[in-house]
Image: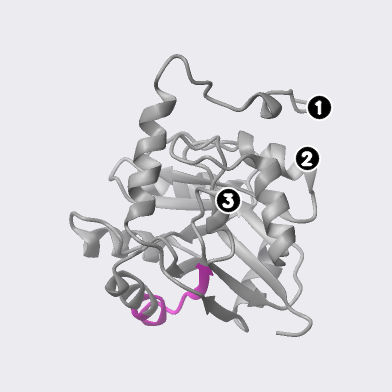
Amino acid sequence: MKGRLRIDLHSHTCYSPDARTTPAQLIERAAEIGIDRVAVTDHGEIEGALRAQALDPERIIVGEEVRCRCRTELIGLFLTDRIPEGLPIESVVERIRDQGGLVYAPHPWAYLVRPGLHARRAIQSADIVEVFNSRAFWGRWNRLAAQSAAEFDRVAASSSDAHFPHEIGRAWTAVPAFGGPEELLQALRGAEIVARRSASPVVHIASVSWRAARRVPLLPRIPREETAPILGR
């Protein structure tokens, strides 16, 4: 992997309701373990990604994980504006592309209801398919994602889907150096998928518990150190 970049195209900060990592913690952890580029893809929000990018412009890619009206989830990469959730999948794809972004299919088979339908919708729409998600604890989900990416001739990536700092580094993709979206697509054609390990289902319980705890009025929604405004916004 000499001369290559380690990239993680799917991660979350505390601006996702079920994640605890602050933007500063994400950057610190990524730097510590040698992840060169990280896409911050909070649920229905880009504020955390923008704050992380302000702290480390070279390392951070602004993204968003969007739940479409059909309940299929897509990620937009290289975004400048938030995309509302609950739109038809075609509208979500259009809004990502209108921003010059890339459409990324996260955990395409990891749905409890009608996974094949969700996978087909996501992969047909996507530029990049996530073939290993470290939170997809049932191995079949990742195996089917890899098979589907090959079937639809999509470039592949491996990502952590980290919601807590210790999850960062559980998976990444090694690629040649790239600049913007089109260069990333080209770089992924020569990628090396690094899938270190899958998480236990316990991580999902931790996320659900954290989401519930944040609804308690006595707990702050966003840690104090992350509440300062972004200059120019």
Residues at marks 3 and 1 touching, judged by CB atoms closer than 8 Å = no
* Residue under the point 72% across and 51% down: 28
- Left or right: 113 with respect to 143? left
- Left or right: 125 with respect to 28? left
Where residue 115 sits, quadrant-wise, is bottom left
Secondary structure, mark 1, is loop
Colour mapping used in the image: one colour
Hey, what amino acid is under mark 1? Leu
Disc 3 versus disc 1: distance between alpha carbons?
26 Å
Where residue 231 sits, quadrant-wise, is top right
Residues at marks 2 and 1 touching, judged by CB atoms closer than 8 Å = yes
Residue tagged 2: 54
Quick one: 102 or 140, which is closer to the camera?
140
Secondary structure, mark 3, is helix
Q: Can you tell which mark lies on residue 165?
A: 3
Residue tagged 1: 231
Q: Which portion, as a residue range, is magenta?
A: 147-158
Total numbered labels: 3
* Residue under the point 71% across and 70% down: 183
The mark that comes first in sequence, 3 or 1, is 3
